[in-house]
Image: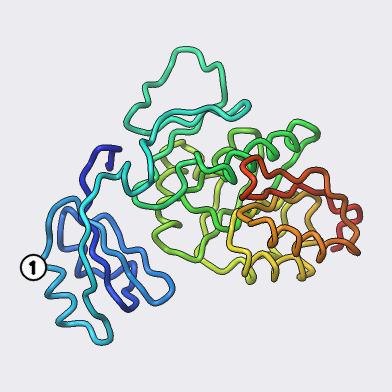
Amino acid sequence: MLQSDDLLYIYYIRGMLDSGDPRPGRSEYFQGTWAEDGCSFLFFTSCEDALVEWIVENTEGIRFMDRFEMTMAEWHGDAVEPFVVGDIRVIPSWEYAKPEKIARKQVVLNPGVVFGTGRHPTTEDTLELMQSILRSEPVRTCLDIGTGTGLLSLAAAVMGVDSVVACDFNMLAVKTALANAKRNELEQNILTVCGKGEELISTRADILVANIHYDVMKILVETKGFYEKKWFVLSGLFNSQSENILSRLYDRPVTILERRCPDGVWNTICGRVEKPVG
């Protein structure tokens, strides 16, 4: 189990490697493959130059680019530490000791090498706005698009949502989210799915949370499935992107409840669909 000060050996490969490729799995130090946009990153907790060289030589269409060494905290951009957002307390798995009395709803998280420790302003704002909705009325189902480490799905489940679908297009993220669901004994409440948000937006849910790229977001808000939800929290948007999404929602049957941009850069939009279709 990765911890904040563990050293990572990261191999940057030009070309796409299967995240389930068994060859890097021959190493007991293999942590996973992140493959996206024509590039792959292999993560190990030990130097595996010879193995990676073998993979490159025996796989068509890929090329070795570079190797990096850094701690997991450096990879994530900061130390992975406990923090509180509203009623939710997030605890790194290596610091978790089950208390006799729980003052807050707790999420035990190990992000591994997947981004999403929870400290980005988009995640914190989404967590706060989700909690505001969940306190206002019962919410039974949730769709989390771009789940990453699964943090937002876990928060929804501990706040009382019965059924959560956590999806991501990256298989390593899906595996990490599933491991965190099991870590919190919430695998019966959270279904992890590998797939594109555009293909899964029709999944029935009371609330949609999506902390994702603008290129995906602008497609989602044009789909029928988006307006089948009652609530939505959209995040991961720069100012101009947020304005564009709001313009697309302007003549739709929605009420924008809040738009947040505490740092002047990252935007989060919370809203309600007045007459959900379907």
Quadrant in the picture for residue 180: top left
Which residue is at the far left? 50
User: In the picture provided, is 184 more to the left or to the right than 53?
Assistant: right
- Quick check: 74 above or below 52? above
User: Which colour style is shown?
Assistant: rainbow
138 and 10: which is toward the camera = 10
Which residue is at the far top? 100
Residue 117 position in % (x across, y down): 45, 42
In the image, what residue type sits under mark 1? Ala
Q: Residue at x 53, y 44 (%)?
A: 188
User: In the picture provided, is 74 more to the left or to the right than 124?
Assistant: left
Q: Residue at x 64, y 56 (%)?
A: 237
Q: Residue at x 80, y 35 (%)?
A: 137
Residue 61 position in % (x across, y down): 28, 86
Query: Mark 1 falls on what kind of element?
Result: helix
User: In the picture provided, is 276 more to the left or to the right than 23?
Assistant: right
- Which residue is denoted by mark 1 in the rendering? 50
Residue 67 position in % (x across, y down): 20, 63
Quarter of the image with the N terminus in it: top left
Residue 71 position in % (x across, y down): 25, 44
Q: Residue at x 14, y 81 (%)?
A: 57
Which residue is at the far front? 264
- Quick check: 137 above or below 220? above
Mark 1 surroundings: few (<14), some (14-19) or many (≥20) residues within 10 A? few
109 and 75: which is toward the camera = 75
